[in-house]
Image (tube, helix red, strand yellow):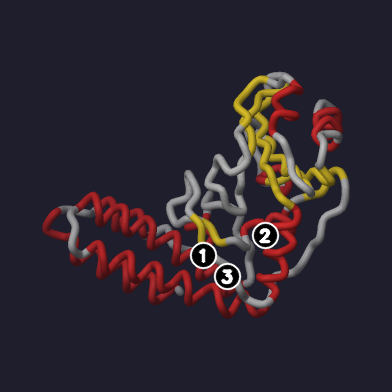
Amino acid sequence: MWLDPVVDRLADLPGVVAVSLGGSRARGTHGPDSDWDLGVYYRSGFDPAHLRAVGWEGEVSDLGAWGGGVFNGGAWLRIDGVPVDVHYRDLAVVEHEVAEASRGRFHWEPLMFHLAGIPSYLVVAELALNRPLRGTLPRIDYPEPLRESAPPFWRGRARATLDYARRGGVTEAAGALAVAAMCTAHAILASRGEWVTNEKKLLARAGLQDVDALIEGLRHDTVGDSLEAGNSLFDRLA
């Protein structure tokens, strides 16, 4: 299979101790056109120049280029015509977040393409859901302290976002409803002890599809009512 030599090449990069398969392909929910998501776990530093030197077509970012937090960079590649996303993971950081999550502690970070940003326990979720292909990685169940601490955090962000939007117009209200919905979905899934690694299908998993109708119905004279309806929906489900 074409994947094996790719994984071997990644595993041989200096500093890399493990490679995992993530995304829909790790969960068996992928389609024929789905990307391949590969996590590259390293210790004691990683130099993306070594990945660039392999010569695969695509864009290889520097460390920290995707936000500088736990999701600290990667590459968008095409290998033999196949789209492959590589994600850098500092194993020391990941292990720290495992310890934090087990105590119900985490922090929030902004990240491109994520309306609500991400919790630092995202990298812990990856360990739980992804499939190691080379090397060994820690694996934990959803910690009970995290089920208690995460939902109120996300509910609080949702409420604050909607409250602020009352002073804006239709565009601000639409954005606020979308962000608040994602935050509420995080709260719902955390209360169930279900891991989240991205926002794809997050609203459907949380039963929040009705938000689409609220956003579609926004007009200048309905902003207040729509935000109130959103608040009611989120409070009822979360």
Amino acid, disc 3: Ala
In the picture as drawn, the residue positioned furthest to the left comes out as 221
Q: Quadrant of the rendered structure where residue 4 is?
A: top right
Amino acid, disc 2: Ala
Expressed as whole percent of the image width and height from the top left, the position of residue 11 reads: 84, 37
Q: Nearer the viewer, residue 87 or 52?
A: 52
Expressed as whole percent of the image width and height from the top left, the position of residue 8 reads: 86, 33
Q: Is residue 86 above or below residue 220?
A: above
**CA separation, marks 3 and 2?**
11 Å
The quadrant of the image that shows the N terminus is: top right
- Density class for disc 2 (Cα within 10 Å; few <14, some 14-19, many ≥20) is many
- Residue 28 is left or right of residue 206, and the answer is right
* Location of mark 2 (residue): 125
- Residue 233 is left or right of residue 30, and the answer is left
Residue at point 39% right, 57% down? 179
Q: Quadrant of the rendered structure where residue 212 is?
A: bottom left
SS at badge 1: helix
